[in-house]
Image: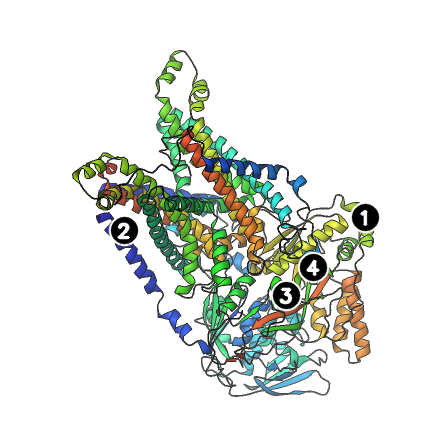
Amino acid sequence: MIRFILRRLLWGIPVLWVVATLTFILMQVVPGGPFDKDKPLPVEIKANVEAKYHLDKPVWQQYLFYLQALLQGDLGPSYKYLGRDVNDIIGDTLPVSLQLGLLSLLVAVMVGFVLGILAVVKPQSWIDRAGMIFVTAGISIPNFVIGALFILWLSHAYKLFPPALWEGWRHAILPALTLGLAPAAFIARLLRSSILEALHQDFVRTARAKGLGEGAILLKHVLKNSVTPVVTFLGPLTATLVTGSFIVEYIFAIPGMGKFFITAVTNRDYPLIMGVTLVYSAIIVLANLVVDIAYAYRDPRVRVE
Amino acid sequence: MKTIGIILAVLGIILVITLISWGPERSRLSSQESKIFRMNLGSEPPTLDWSLATDSVSITVIENIMEGLTRYDEKLQPNPAIAKRWEVSGDGKTYRFYLREDARWTDGHPVTAEDFEYSWKRLLDPKTAAEYAYFLYDIVNAYEYNTGQLKNAGQVGVKALGPWILEVNLKKPIVYFPSLTTFIVTFPQRRELIERYGEHWTDPDRLITNGPYRLKEWQHEYKVILEANGDYFDGRPQLDHVVMFVVNEPTTALTLYETGDLDMVRLPPEAITFYQHHLEYHRIPVLRGYYYGFNTTKVPFLDVRVRRAFSMAIDREELPRVLKGGEIPSTSWIPPGMFAYNPNIGLKFDPQGAKRLLAEAGYPEGKNFPAVTVVYDTNPINNLIAENLQAQWRRNLNVQVNLENQEWKVFLKRLKTDTPMIFRLGWGADYPDPDNFMVLFTTRSGNNNTHWSNLHYDELIANAASETDSKRRQQMYDETQRILTEQDVAIMPLFVATQNILIKPYVKGLQLNAMEILSLRDVHLTPRSRESIQ
Amino acid sequence: MKKLSVVWWRAPGGHKPDLVMLGSGVLIIMVCIMAALAPWLAPYSYDAQDNTALLQLPSSEHWMGTDRLGRDLFSRLLYGTRISMSMGLLTALSALVLGTVYGAISGYVGGRVDNWMMRWVDIVYALPDLLLIILIMVIVGRGFWGIFLALILVSWVTVARIVRGEVLKHREQSYVEAARALGAGHLRILFRHILPNTFGPLIVILTFRIPAAILAESTLSFVGLGITPPLASWGTLANEGWAALKFYPHLIVFPGLFIFFTILAFNFFGDGLRDVLDPQNRRVYR
């Protein structure tokens, strides 16, 4: 098991290295980037940037400096916020995004599980059909439309929840719902098809032959075996939550990393863009790692590769 | 079952962690509601260094944490602030400000004349590269020092005669000089702190100020929190805290106002018709002009005929219809309410004439017209104006311009480093005198982004500033306005802005004025229930 | 409790016409027609501003009302359909071609080449797609072709993965061996024998790529990184409507509904297609 974990960890490192290298190349290539000597820069930024990036040295040396800084955890100075480092900015905004992400995950799992199981409990009923239509709708509707609808309904019309900011639990409801809805739909669909598949299996027939009640069958045997695809889905789900957070934080004016990412892109704050990309990649790699480990824990066959 | 148990446990832990992390910090701020004023800045303040700030967002924050020699009253007359009185010499060229001795910085040090002298010289120091350096050019040797001709700052005409007297020597008499000393660039600074901390001197944990509030916290792109300064010489303000949020979207801000999360808000154009008759609505005409400037050094706007054509090709009457805020379309530059206002100046709407000029310049029917981009700072009003003008130029000149928008902070930098062909800007009066509006476009002005220079214009403006005969003064400003908007057309004035705002009824002591100075010093909140407006 | 029976949501391909799938297909065709015929169907030009008719609610003159500059929303939506649909179709097709070629070669050649090629795919696959898209757009700039390039560069990987799997599966089949024995060259085997067997899954992939592209483009335009004015895609219109959400919700509701129903239709249609063409559906198409 340990070997498996180590192997998976080692696999994550080349991924991050590739991302770092790619972003470095990107920033060299892009016009007006920190390395573009032709583009006129505000004086104070120019001084900082040149000092930091050793712009007078050949490219490959710049690259080594860049990697060295990265290994020390230094993501460089922000291009647009004079005097602030990317590390500071990420340090301020990452916890907010994590909060939002975790809450949305909660919403997604709870709603998704309920819907997924509901569908199977009352087969062919209108609940099932309605549930599944709802679920397909959930993955088809863009999150800015959902967000807009929620705000329109619960904020403008009924003034129940604030439409923006992050000042307390009231402010977290609408964003978490908006962000968590699409993943909830995915989970519901996955769970449902996986339960259905499990119901066909022999062990269910055995259990029925043994005389077990339907409820017990569902809980003890079926659910246990259908959770696996959902667990594997949690890896890509993290990616969905990350990209979804860009939009949700933007709409709800939440001071998270996603909103800063968008701002950094429109501002062309390249060090910040690079730093945020790396942090997101690290998160995804970590999430996938955790999922793989959980999967391997439950299913020993996977460990032998 | 075990798996489900594990999953539930993990989720439970997540829930607990998230709830805990919303700790006492936030609840403290919301429990004492009646002493906290919440407003929206609209965008991130580019800087809090008052030698470097040039924009209204930064100024809104700074003018509440700092105080200068004088301040305005409701009639926009300069009143004593840190200066308890002042004297003018017979020839009007020497001012002596006598400072009060009980004004303190937030670290306990007294505010002295040396602090003012240091700050003014820092503004003029070429190394600071302050865009507002020209603000003090009337002072003896100020221009020479700022342009590097004079190395010794000691010869600049501002001097501290001991800790409580500041003496200023001007090149010529400036009647409105005490109005100038209300403006942020003349606020005092602490030499030893700036020298010690360099560019970090405005960080929340380092910034030392002397105004009614002090900077408590600055969460970038999110909010600025000010807290009351108990040592303020005029008495501690009645509010405990001011929270200035950075909500970019005006409609979101409006809804926050309605859900009770903001106490004051600016109305976006589409909302104005709905709130016009509301009790909480206020419309204030302001001394703020909105214009599009040309980069006069680049093709095609190098050619004055093209500039004239563009200005003549737009019907400004369309703009207030689109904006719905009662804006006043304007072809001249000095706004109504200010001396020397003259609506008859400027290029009137004349599409035929515009077309002719464009053809003369070599682009008949807009053929071969080079690609032109209009750059503006991101904001729904600017968006509307830009798209409207884009359509008008298409319609009347057959020219297609592209649009680009950037965040305010970034936009300001872009104006300096890579001036766009056409850019939008506004200008709010720093003091209620036409000189402030006209000096903007002189050659030396750091806020003149058009790269246009007309020495005759410069000369007229300099003379008009000290002209005492009002008829002659009016004539001089007429002539300069004509040069600016009809002859050389360095800019296209578009309209004069209005402020359309909503203020909660429990907010008292907020003074609204045509200079858009938002002073929160006297604000207090009467107790209220959490009701929101319909 | 009643016995848990197996639930059949849809009839497997062929036997009973699936109404949902049919309805979706009809909607898709309608949207395509709207896109193609937009200039003729639109009562106004997409950038015709009318100062006297600002922010109107839907009426007989303006079926979906007007926006803040007096432009007819219905017309703008029609033109927006053009842009969004063409973007969706073009990127899906291009990604399909690109991914197929890559995946086919990787799967067919096999061995270490396959390993390396798939490593790249895994890396790109591991990253959040919107993030990559935005990064690429930082370089290539905004506008139609910028988005196009960015979307393709990110979406080809899903296709490549699936195609590679298919090719691997078919490579060992006996008919391939037979063809080789008859002297057929590799290219011929690949393109004349193996790939045609993958058409089923390929079509399903295409059907799911289109809504993904539409969604990505809408999202980009919504945050202001997409199409430039005065052109407007659905996402741009949603962005404009978003600012006026409070008072003139029709400005965002209509574009929102268009996006929603179109994507929904593609999703339903794709589901149905998948049941018909690829009943084993062991692979993830999204």
Which quarter of the rendering shows the N terminus of chain A? top left
Please tell me which residue lies in front, B184 or C216: C216
**Marks 3 and 1 belong to one chain:** yes
- Single out the mark in the foreground, 3 or 1: 3
Residue, disc 1: B359
Of the two numbered discs 2 and 4 on the same chain, state the one appearing first in sequence.
Answer: 2
Chain ID at mark 4 = B
| Residues at marks 2 and 4 on the same chain | yes
In which quadrant will I find the C terminus of chain A?
top left
> Would you name the residue on which mark 4 appears?
B293
Q: What is the three-letter code of the residue carrying label 2? A: Ile
Sequence-wise, the earlier of marks 4 and 1 is: 4
Q: Nearer the viewer, mark 2 or mark 3?
A: 3
Q: Earlier in the sequence, mark 2 or mark 3?
A: 2
Residue at disc 3, secondary structure: helix
Return the mark for residue B273.
3
Residue B499 sits in quarter: bottom right
Q: Position of residue C242 (x, y in %)?
A: 55, 55
Structural distance between the alpha carbons of marks 3 and 1: 41 Å
Residue at mark 2: chain: B
Depth check: give the residue in front, B413 or C22: C22
The amino acid pointed to by label 3 is Thr
Alpha carbon of mark 2 to alpha carbon of mark 1: how far? 74 Å
User: In this orientation, which residue lies closer to the viewer: A204 or B72?
Assistant: A204
Provide the residue designation for mark 2: B7
| Mark 2 surroundings within 10 Å by alpha-carbon count, few (fewer than 14), some (14 through 19), many (20 or more) | some
Give amino acid for label 4.
Answer: Gly
Tell me which label, 2 or 1, sits earlier in the chain. Answer: 2
Q: Is residue C61 left or right of residue B501?
A: right
